[in-house]
Image (cartoon, rainbow, N blue to C red):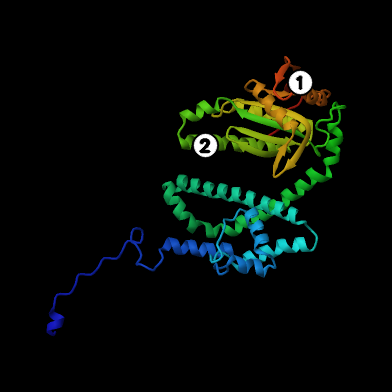
Amino acid sequence: MNDDEQQEQPAPVPAADPATAHPPTGTLSAERLAAKALEARLLGGERKLRRREVAGGAGLSLLSARKLWRALGFPNFGDEDVAFTERDQAALSTVVDLVRTGKLTEEAAISVTRAIGQMTDRMVVWQIEALVEDMVHEQGVTDALARKRLVNELPALVDALEEMLVYSWRRQLNAGVQRLAVRAEAGLQASEEGREGDEDDAPLPLARAVGFADLVSYTSLSRRMNEKTLARLVQRFENKCAEIISVGGGRLVKTVGDEVLYIAETPAAGAEISLALAQAFTEDEILPEARVAMVWGRILSRLGDIYGPTVNLAARLTTLADPGTVLVDSMTASALDQDERFVLLPQPAENVRGFGEIHPVRLSRGLGKGLILD
């Protein structure tokens, strides 16, 4: 062994812990690599195009392209930002072709695009939070660690989630066509019963039973709960409402904290859902009771929400209902009067802001078992 070989050799460097080691400058961590791979899969490839290139490739001015991107909820990008893929250009071309072939006006295309953007944005947030919550519960990890691991968990779920999304959209589109087009005329004719001479809501195009359910003492409860307990309470409330409303053939329009807004196609369907909601929360061992009100009348349906005096009256009636009970107005009571499934008890007249004097009627169960939940 020569002199050089006899020199003391440096101690071996221990292998770096991949969970804590920082990658050398210029290299990406495993987490970043996984995130880039997931992005390429979801976006259809690597970001290579600038906004003017995408707009030009679709045969659009940059102004028109930006209108559609804003409708989808995309952030603003600069001229030099390499932010798009070929799939972005193909999607833009799809919308442009609908307008150029006369299948949609530009205004309708933007409105439909906005609906897609807003609904998918809310859906994605909901799904991610559900997956993170499940990982925290099942794997016993922190919320922060679950969010990091999600990038590695998602690739195995993407195809199934996409398939379910398309399946659900087709089913919901069919149900929507039946509800909002095929059966709309019958509902309008039914809405005229007992409402002759009421011209204020006549121009509104759809007849629906509109209902609200409002948890009692939610504000005081929320002050005494930590974030996780409150989140579970809200989730239990929303899940129970969604189940009852769907079983009753209605549609959950939206939830706002402690309140849910729903609609049904007939007064009887609305009454069944309303009674089932009031009963469910009265019997629930965790949730407080709910005030419920329902009104049959005409509405305007836009942007996934509903508008009109019928909606406002149902909201006002909800505040008048006692916990665990259902109120309807006198005209809705007239539409249900001959149905033996319901008992209608007139209440004292009330002066309601925006409506003057109204005559609430308490709705109770008559003959029959009501909605049966599996």
Question: Residue 11 falls in which quadrant of the image?
Answer: bottom left
What element does badge 2 sit on? helix
The local crowd at label 2, few if under 14, some if 14 to 19, many if 20 or more residues have their Cα within 10 Å, is few
**Left or right side of 122 for 205:** right
Q: Please say whether residue 151 is visible from this viewpoint.
A: yes
Report the side of 15 relative to 37 (left or right): left
Screen quadrant of the N terminus: bottom left
Indicate the quadrant where residue 372 lies.
top right
Q: Is residue 301 left or right of residue 130?
A: right
Q: Quadrant of the C terminus?
A: top right
Residue shown at the point (60%, 50%) measured from the top left: 121
- Answer whether labels 2 and 1 touch (C-beta < 8 Å): no
Name the foreground residue: 354 vs 158. Answer: 354
Q: Nearer the viewer, residue 26 or 8?
A: 26
Q: What type is the residue that disc 2 sits on?
A: Arg
For marks 2 and 1 on the same chain, the one whose residue lies earlier in the sequence: 2
Residue 270 picture location, percent across and down: 74, 32
Question: What residue is disc 2 on?
Answer: 232
Identify the amino acid type marked 1: Val
Query: Alpha-carbon distance for marks 2 and 1?
Result: 35 Å
Depth check, front residue: 299 or 35: 299
- Could you tell me residue 31's position as x and y percent? 43, 60
Query: Which residue is located at x 77 percent, y 63 percent?
Result: 100
Quarter of the image where one finds residue 313 = top right
Q: Is residue 164 something that shows in the picture?
A: no
- x and y, in percent, of residue 122 in the image: 60, 47
For label 1, the residue is 343
- Crowding at dot 1, Cα within 10 Å, few <14 / some 14-19 / many 20+, comes out as some
Q: Position of residue 185 (x, y in %)?
A: 86, 40
From the viewer's perspective, is residue 191 above or below residue 4? Answer: above
Residue sitting farthest toward the bottom? 2
